[in-house]
Image (spheres, rainbow, N blue to C red):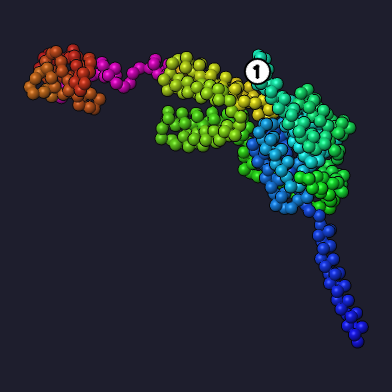
Amino acid sequence: MRRTRITCSMLFVWLGWLALLLSTVPAWAAPAPVVVVPLQGAIGPATSAYVLRGLEQARERGAQLVVLQLDTPGGLDLAMRDIIRAILDSPFPVAGYVAPGGARAASAGTYILYACHIAAMAPGTNLGAATPISLMGQDGESTAATRKSINDASAYIRGLAELRGRNVQWAERAVREAVSLPATEALQEHVIDQIATDVPDLLTRLDGLSVSIHGEQRVLHPLGAELITITPTWHERLLALITNPSVALILLMLGFYGLVFELLMPGIGVPGIMGSICLLVALYALHLLPLNYAGAALLLLGLGLMVAEAMVPSFGILGLGGLIAFASGAFMLIDTEAPGFGISLWLIASLALLSALFLAVIVGMALQARRQKVVTGDEKLTGTLAQVIQLQDNDVYRGMAIVRGEQWQIRSTAPLHPGQTVQIQARHGLVLDVAIVNEPHPGES
């Protein structure tokens, strides 16, 4: 009987251990998810906000790996450094993957790829050309500034290469000589770690790989993991649109001319409201971009001169100066030549042409107005006929007359009488000087 009790107790213990093991099977069978963040196009404020949100969502979902899929010509330095800081601070591995075939990770994209814990490329892709672009000239001062910028960028990418154990020499050449590499050569030169045809192939190659995260080794098991793709929100898409310098310039023009139109034709309301909205959105976008203040000042000066031409026509002098200042300012407005952040010369020329047409219409209307006959004011009264209706205090040289349905005081050098037709010669305040029209006096034949 006692042996039976012992056997039952052992059975219950084994059953408990078995239940505990079975409860952990789902955890073994379902690895932590893998988050994919596709980064396409020029890297700017909207891109950095999108990538940072993707990394934050990956942390909230307990992801074991983030795949940052790159296809970029480069972008702004500040936005690139924001992304790199987030990658370096990430509590989980980040794999930079240049894909699909035909994609590139040029300029800022090369720095980001070097910062990732794992660097991979798809066949038919390339990376490199990481030299900072300078807008300066060729004099001694600008050459020294350019050299300083290149040295800073070179040290930055060397630090990333040393951190990830990748080819330091080629990284420096990518900055100083703007060299590029296709995927196969990048793997041979130990610039990247893997070549994979697509994301599933990349995850297969990474299965079992050990990655150091802040001094701690993590073993990846991405096979069978849930793939979660983070896409840009409408806010990020809108931000990417308005931070395009060309779009920002167009919004600035629409806003400015909307307000001018409202001032010229008050009471409508719609141009003023829409102009204010466009102007505020444009200013917000320019605030996020590397603005050249000299270019902004020239742009505002040009717009001001063109408005002055519209308000006080100078027959083209102010307008021509405004067009020159506007074109110069628009060309200098964004203080970078990063891919995707330049303003097209065709756009500048088109906006200048539209402004010139606007000014031509204004000047033409002014010239036409000068040639037209005066229809208001003292000039219009001169020569107008009036009819005497009464004398003033029996003064035959002063009286009241009807002029276009209005009563006016009149005075004459010749005697007046009611019913007489006179012609206005001049105006002195509220009194009109008149001359008698040659007509027979009542009672004369």
Magenta span contains residue 186: no
Quarter of the image with the N terminus in it: bottom right
Q: Is residue 47 visible?
A: no
> Farthest bottom residue?
1
Q: Which residue is mark 1?
A: 142
Question: Which portion, as a residue range, is magenta?
Answer: 366-389
Q: Residues within 10 Å of mark 1 (few under 14, many from 20)?
A: some
For the point 19% across and 21% down, the residue is 431
**Secondary structure category for the residue under label 1:** helix
Viewer-nearest residue: 88 or 312? 88
Q: Is residue 241 visible?
A: yes
For the point 80% across and 38% down, the residue is 164
Viewer-nearest residue: 47 or 432? 47
Decide if residue 358 is on the left or right side of residue 240: left
Q: Is residue 58 above or below residue 306?
A: below
Residue 255 place in picture, x, y as percent: 51, 32
Q: Amino acid at mark 1?
A: Ser
Viewer-nearest residue: 259 or 176? 176
Residue 330 place in picture, x, y as percent: 58, 23
Task: State which quadrant residue 82 falls in.
Answer: top right
For the point 66% across and 33% down, the residue is 78
